[in-house]
Amino acid sequence: MIHKVLNAYFAKKKSKKLTNDVVLPILVDAAFVAAIILVYVTEWNVIIKLVVQIVVAILFLAFVVCWENKRCKKWKTAFDEHNKTLDEIAEILKALEYKNGSSCDNWYSEEKIDYLITSAEKWITEHTERKSEIEKLAHVVVLPVIGFVAAVIQDNATVEDAISIGVAVIIIVAMGYVIDKGVSMLIDSIIKTASIDEMSMLMNLLQDLKARDFT
């Protein structure tokens, strides 16, 4: 039943317009990854590359902090929008009507919302464990390979080369994380009902709806 509610929510809500709040973070993330790649393909001195990487990382962190501060200042707008979303969920649950003997009932009740929350938690737990197993497998395969290559290179490497290798490993892991998140977001946007993030979002909405309307 929880997936039917999720499908109804996606069918009901309007598609978001591409505003600066949506586009800008994506562009900054892409620019960050592109800058790191560009640093490695250039023939600069190792120290210069390290300094550029640190500067890029600081600028990226500064953007994240400023963006978070800006988002926090819009708390009232975010609160109003959240309440509108809760109203939409309530309308969906009220529209899910069924016959109960001679009367007509729906899914807008505290007990049924509790059931939906429990169903969502169970689904999220199962799929999170599955995803964790895949990530563990990737770590078991990838990290030893990176360590082996680094050790082989480091046998004949200078101090600068060793620093460069260490930074490269950190950057590779960070880029892998960014790419993984990007791929996950792409898959989530295509197959929303199979998304852990979307199901978590619905579960949180149901919890907030229960707290708002039944307590």
Image: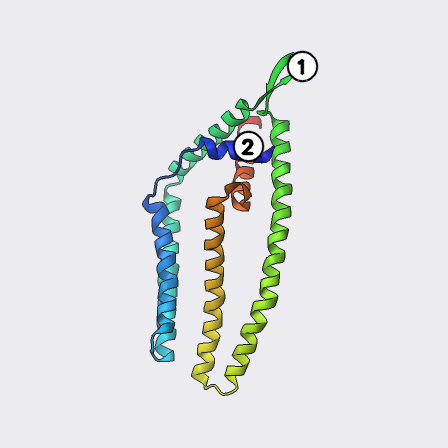
Any mark on residue 113, and which?
A: none
Residue 150 to residue 176: above or below = below
Residue that carries the numbered disc 1 in the rendered image? 101
Residue 76, percent from left and from top: 39, 37
Could you say which quadrant of the image residue 112 lies in? top right
Residue drawn at point x = 34 percent, y = 43 percent: 18
N-terminal of the pair, mark 1 or mark 2, is 2
Categorize mark 2 by other alpha carbons within 10 Å: few (<14), some (14-19), many (20+).
Answer: some
In this view, the residue in front, 28 or 4, is: 4
Q: Give 121 or 95, whichever is nearer the viewer.
A: 95
Query: Residue at 52% across / 78% down in the picture?
Result: 150
* For residue 51, side relative to residue 12 (left or right): left
Q: Name the residue under label 2.
A: 5
Q: Can residue 209 be seen in this view?
A: yes
The quarter of the image holding the N terminus is top right
**73 w.r.t. 106: above or below:** below
Distance between mark 1 and mark 2 Cα atoms: 23 Å
Q: Position of residue 42 (x, y in %)?
A: 34, 74
Q: Nearer the viewer, residue 179 or 158?
A: 179
- In the rendering, at what x and y percent does residue 206 appear? 55, 34
